Structures are given as structure tokens and as C-alpha cells.
Amino acid sequence: MQAANRLIHETSPYLLQHAHNPVDWYPWSEEAFSRARAENKPVLLSVGYSACHWCHVMERESFENPGIARVMNENFVSVKVDREERPDVDDVYMKAVQMLTGRGGWPMTVFLTPDGKPFYGGTYFPPIDRHGMPGFSRVLEAVARAWRERPDDVARSVDQLFAGLARMEENRPTERALDPALPRRAAEALLRHVDLDQGGLGGAPKFPHTSAFQLFLRQYRATANPPLLEAVRLTCERMAKGGMYDQIGGGFHRYTVDAQWRVPHFEKMLYDNAQLPRLYLEAFQVTGDRWLRAIAEETLDYVLRDLRHPEGGFYSATDADSEGEEGKYFIWTRADVARVVEPRDLELVCRYWDISDDGNFEGRNIPHVTLSGEEVARLFGRSPEEAAHAIGEARRRLLSARAGRVPPLRDEKILASWNGLMIGTLAEAGRVFGARRFVDAAVAGATFIWDRMRSGGRLLHGWAGGRAKGDAYLDDHAFVASALLDLYEATGERMHLARARDLVAALEARFHDDEAGAYFFTAHDGERLIARTKSGADGSLPAGNSVAAHVLLRLYHLTGEPSYRERAEEILRLYHDEAAANPFAYASYVQALELYTEGPTEVVVIGRQGATDADALWAVVALTYLPHRVLVRAEAGEKDVPAPARERRPLDGRATAYVCRHFACSSPVTDPAELERLLGSST
């Protein structure tokens, strides 16, 4: 085996994958840049992540190639970064690559001056010229020659990119009033991009774009425009029946390469499996369709089974590859299935999941649903109950058989931001479905973050290899604060509300831009990079500033403290015009704007925690779709309650609900049916 390089001392699974490359890798560090300055060499920055298929391909083709490694070692100081561990580094240099090439992605390769300024870059490079792309060897030699022989050209490129990065951060608050019609117009604009045959936005490759479809649900509630709900139903159904969804083990893959949701890139990311169940949960609340609930629960149970640390935190991802082959863990031959499934059920199961001798993917099969349970039952002369039992039993047996295969690598980093998304969804699922296992898992996850991922009272970004490290970012604070508010609503435990307020106070003290408003991605006292970003646009994750604005508004309505609303309005004004021009990238912003302009439905239940009459009222609330809401549990005579519960009393000693909208409250009710009527009229 090749001798280990410096990455052997890191905790990131992605960096450790490269610890035995012949490349003289450095982690991101002052040591690397000091050497570059001392030797007047450019820095080769390579950024990727553990579940990235093409990152593995470039490693095998180039970074394990002794000849290419020799060129890198002689001409560059090479730095390897896990984008999930250092999202600040990734964000800055990805913007530079996008300016250079018009696109982005991973693996990302950027060439920097010794003071960290980019002058050339790209994404995946093959080892030799191929498919119109220059070979990595040729790129390395050309960049090294330019550095030695054309320093003026390098300097001009640096100046152009540096100026471009500065322009990207020149947000200005709108001079207009915040537009309450913007969410409706945004939904209408996005609706025009829905694939009316297969669901989703646009064509191949197909990504889930969860926030956009949550916007459709909210605007369906506001406008009763049927195509909005139809787009959500269609997309949820096509994803759940396709190869995008793991039909055997549950959970969603990252995206599909085709427009029919059938052929995925097989990595599974925690953030997708946190966001998508929430969409299915909300669609269930709107429609009552139980299959939507089933997909949400199956996905969350997959996370609890395969992505949970024993102490409660959640791992980041599983790889697309196993045994060096993409998707091998997830695909089947008909013979594989025949060895496992009950013989009398084989034809039914294969027809249901499109399993054939010829295969539907490179001679093998990606299971995807071709018929409904009722249709396959009729086709094989079974009752719907018998068919459902046969499919369920086949799924159980296939999952057991699959467990004997070599699994994809699991990235066991625990990231505060992604865990925040997961904890919030688990809390909400526990509340809506009345499922204690989900609430308990959310509490355990939040406890892990609070106990294991803070130092000196400050939140840290990541945990791996038994220790937490790295300054937390805007997303970490905002997403965890949002999750804690969800946990507060699910449990009534005031501790979660207090901790959310602590995290927002940290944002205010260490991240706020006192000149232009909103929050920087990095803290004032964090490591200084060549640019300090402050985006309001969504990517695969919701924008941190948009989530922060939503959290601030929830806190305003819970506490009555106007400073929270003022800070939220500042964020909304800063990104308003960008959101109006490009709603596709600002669906999370629009959610916060809706809460600001519409206000929440406030539901307060005064009653003994866990009492039958109080639980009956909360069960009604759970089944009602209330996207903009404040939920408060309090007991009679309790002191220091949140603002909506002040001066609220029970009627005749029974659990009593109050429903308020726009600073006007209904008469208190004790009957669940009456509460259901009130909530229906409030939406």
C-alpha cells in the first residue's frame, strides 16, 4: 500500500479516502499556504465529498496515478477539502468556478495563488483528453507553465475573478414595500416549469426541489388553485414509484439521470431524506392520502435504521458505489429475486417492480413500481390484501438478502445543519402522526448536538471520529434553531424554545452584517477567506438567511419581542428583489415572506400535559395543514408562558383551545369537533 500522506490524521471520511494517494495532499491549513508562499508555487485545491461518484472516478483515474501525482507534487501545493466539512471554502471557490466555466459541480478543481486567490478551475477532468474535455495531465502542465512564464495573465485572471466575487455580494435592500403577492406570482411562475407527465421541474436530470413543491402546497391553501395541488400529487407519486425511491429499503436517492425518476445516482444524502418526508407529510395533511404518510414514515424509519449514531446524531450520507461499481448494492437480477421471494409470489412481485431477465438497467434491474396494488392484484387473480401482503413480504425478504451484500460506504460525519433539518422533520412527523418514536429520536438528536457539538457555549459544525470540531456557520445555527422550535411545538418543553433563542442570540452577536443587514455565512471571529459570503438563494439546502428569517418571525410571535420581527424584515428587504426576479432559487425566502405578510394561525391549548382531553385537541391540530402557525401548550396557572398563552384560562376545568388570527381570537372551545371547525375556517 502507498505510504500515508497528511490526510491520515483527519477525521473526515472523504479526506481519509485520499490518505494513501501518492499525491502529497495537505488538508486546508495555513501550513499549506505557507509552503506555497515559501516555494512560490500555486495551490491546487480539490474539493469533493464522500458520496460523490465522479469524485471517486477522478481519484482512481488521476490521484492514484503515479505519473499525474508526480506532476502535482513537483509543481503545486495540493490541498484536499471535504465540501461538507468546509462549506465556506466550497462556496467561495465554487462561485469562482461558475464564473470561469458557467457551471459548477464536484469534484471541483481550482488553482490558487499562494494567498488563496483563484485564477483557473473546473470540475471533473479525465486523465487524458476525452469527450471534448482536456486531460488532467495537460491541464496541470498548462497551468504550471502559465504560472512560470505568464504571470501577468495569471494576475489579470485573479483580478477579474476577485472583482466578480465582490460583485456577487453587493445586495441592496429593496426600496419598495414587501410584496404580499410575490408568493402567488412565484408559484405561478414555477408551475409553468412542471413536467405535466412525470412531475418535477424541467427535464433530465431530475432533482426533487422540495421547497418549490412546499410553496405549491402553501399557495394551494391560499388560492385553491387545483393545478398547484395536482403538481405536488403527481411529483410525489412519480418519485415514490420510481427508482428515485429505494423500493426495498426506503429513503430517497439524490436525483435521477432520466426524466421518469427511474435511474438514480445512488447516493443517499441526509438532507434529502430530511426534507422530502416533510413534503410528503404536508401533502398528507392537505389530501388525507395515506400512501403519502406511508412514504414519509418509511423514509424516516430508514434514517433511524441506517443513518443514526447510537447516541442520537445522524450521519451524513451513503455512497453511490459499492465494490467499485455504482449502484451495485441496489440492483437485482430476476434470479436474485427468485432465490429469495416465495415462489407463488415471484411473477406478481416481478411484474410490480419491473424485474425481468433482460433487465431495465445495464442488464440488471432497478425496482420501480409499474402497477398499483389493485391492478397487480387483478392481473394475478388475488385480492388487494393478498397482493399487498405478497409485496410486503417480498420487500422484507429482499431487504434481508441485501443486508448480506457489501454496503456502500457510510459517511459518519455528523453535521449540525443537516441534523437540524432531520430533527425538525422527525419532531413534526411525531406531532402529526402521533408517533412517539419520531419525537424521541428528535429529542435524542437535539441532545446530541447540545451536549456533544458545543464548546465553551458555542455551537460547532461537525462531529466525526469521536470529537466535534470546526466553527459553526449560519446554516448550523439557523437550521438547529428551527428544529428546536419544531421540538417545542411537538413536546411543549420550554427548554427547546430557550435553546433556540440562545442560537439566534449567537447569530446576532457573531454573524450580523451591521452595514447591509442579514447574516454572513461565517462568524466575525472565524477564519477569513478571500471573500465573505451572505447568500439568500437556496441550493440543495434552504438558504440560511431565509431559514433565519422564518425562525425570527416564529420567535416574534412566541415572545412578542419586536426586535425579532425587525431583524426578519431586514433580511426580507435585502433579498426581496432577487426573489421577485428568480423565484426558483428563493422558495425558502418566500415561505418567510408569507409568514411575515399573512401572520400565523396561533393555537393555544390550556390543559394538563398528557391528559386525554388535551391530547384530543392536539390530535385535531395535528391533522390540520397549518404551514404558518404558532402552537403553545400551557397548564392552568403556569407562570412565564409564551406570549400567546398569557391570560388564557381553561373553561370549566377542561382542556381549552384558543385560535387566533391577525390579533383576533375565537371564543375558547373544549370540543375537538368545534376546534376542527375553527381551524378549517382559519385556513
Image: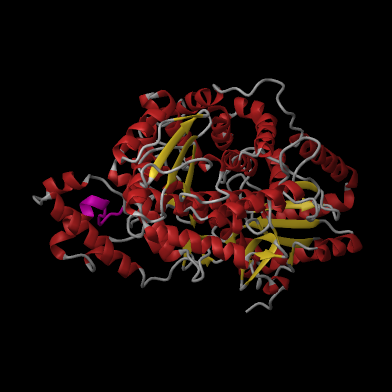
Judging depth in this view, the residue of 451 and 630 nearest the camera is 630
Determine the residue positioned at 85% across, 45% down: 154
Q: Point out the stretch of residues depicted in magenta.
A: 350-359
Q: Which quarter of the picture shows residue 560?
A: top right
Specify the color scheme. Answer: secondary structure
Horizontal and vertical percent for residue 430?
Answer: 40, 53
Horizontal and vertical percent for residue 677?
Answer: 33, 32
Q: Main secondary structure of the magenta part?
A: loop
Q: Quadrant of the N terminus?
A: bottom right
Determine the residue positioned at 22% across, 57% down: 391
Q: Is residue 356 magenta?
A: yes
Tell me: 61 left or right of 34: left
Q: Is residue 16 magenta?
A: no
Horizontal and vertical percent for residue 70?
Answer: 74, 67
Determine the residue positioned at 49% across, 61% down: 443
Tell me: 240 left or right of 371: right
- Residue farthest toward the front in the current orientation of the protein: 652
Horizontal and vertical percent for residue 171?
Answer: 74, 32
Tell me: 486 left or right of 29: left
Q: Is residue 314 visible?
A: no
Judging depth in this view, the residue of 264 and 520 nearest the camera is 520
Q: How many badges with numbers are in the image?
A: 0
Q: Quadrant of the C terminus?
A: top left
Q: Is residue 326 above or below residue 150?
A: below
Q: Is residue 149 visible?
A: yes
Determine the residue positioned at 66% across, 32% down: 569
Judging depth in this view, the residue of 228 and 194 nearest the camera is 228
Judging depth in this view, the residue of 403 and 661 nearest the camera is 661
